[in-house]
Image (cartoon, grey):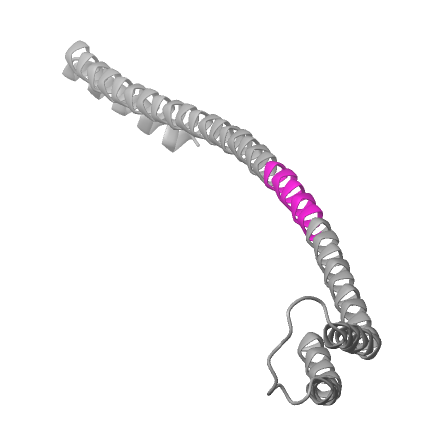
């Protein structure tokens, strides 16, 4: 945008003045040569010297007039280029800084991911140990409960067996008593019992 404005100002100030000077000197050159209607002599003549002088004066005037705008144009152009280079250098520095920040963030994320994986592995190991400990404790409880149930069943079976043996022994003893006692012995036992009742 600055370059276009500089070029525009250069053409608007220099071109009209240069055109006017050119036409003035061209008119003078034509007037001095007689309007250009006479035949041109051969060789170097005075009009050729005037034309060269006119051209040199015109070139000098144009150089004098266009010197400052052209210098300003190139100076502003150099400043613009320097500014663009400075902007590009700043953008390069910012990009390198951002790249460094992103690399640091990536490194931190890598470390953080490794830490998270290690935490999960450690939590998994802890959970494994806890589950194994709970399973072992549960197995011990089940084993103790099974032992108690077996002992209770054994005691119940033993008591039942003892009761059956006692019942069978009593029945056997009763049978033996019945077989070994005669009717006379029964009468005698009844009499002895009655005597004891009467005596008491």
Q: Front-most of 92 and 74?
A: 74
Viewport quadrant of the N terminus: bottom right
Task: Identify whether 116 is placed above or below 31.
Answer: above
Task: Identify whether 51 is placed above or below 83.
Answer: below
Along the horizontal axis of the image, is 171 left or right of 48? left
Q: Front-most of 45 and 189?
A: 45
Along the horizontal axis of the image, is 67 left or right of 27? right
Q: Residue at x 59, y 87 (%)?
A: 37
Main secondary structure type of the part rendered in magenta: helix
Viewport quadrant of the C terminus: top left
- Residue 114 place in picture, x, y as percent: 60, 36
Q: Front-most of 19 and 126?
A: 19
- Residue 50 place in picture, x, y as percent: 77, 77
| Extreme-top residue of the structure | 180
For residue 16: magenta? no
Q: Which residue is drawn at 79% across and 77% down?
A: 69
- The part of the chain drawn in magenta is 98-115
């Amino acid at each position: 945008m600055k370059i276009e404005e500089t070029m525009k100002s250069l053409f608007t100030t220099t071109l009209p003045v240069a055109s006017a000077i050119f036409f003035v000197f061209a008119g003078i050159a034509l007037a001095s040569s007689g309007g250009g209607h006479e035949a041109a002599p051969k060789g170097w003549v005075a009009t050729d010297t005037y034309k060269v002088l006119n051209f040199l004066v015109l070139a000098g005037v144009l150089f004098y007039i266009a010197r400052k705008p052209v210098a300003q144009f190139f100076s502003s152009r150099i400043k613009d280029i320097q500014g663009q280079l400075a902007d590009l250098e700043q953008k390069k520095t910012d990009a390198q800084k951002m790249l460094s920040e992103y690399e640091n963030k990536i490194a931190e994320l890598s470390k953080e991911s490794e830490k998270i994986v290690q935490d999960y592995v450690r939590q998994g190991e802890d959970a494994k140990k806890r589950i194994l400990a709970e399973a072992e404790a549960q197995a011990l409880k089940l084993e103790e409960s099974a032992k108690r149930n077996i002992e209770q069943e054994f005691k119940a079976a033993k008591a039942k067996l003892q009761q059956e043996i006692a019942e069978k022994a009593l029945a056997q003893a009763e049978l033996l008593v019945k077989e070994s006692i005669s009717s006379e012995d029964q009468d005698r036992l009844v009499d002895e019992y009655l005597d004891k009742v009467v005596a008491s």
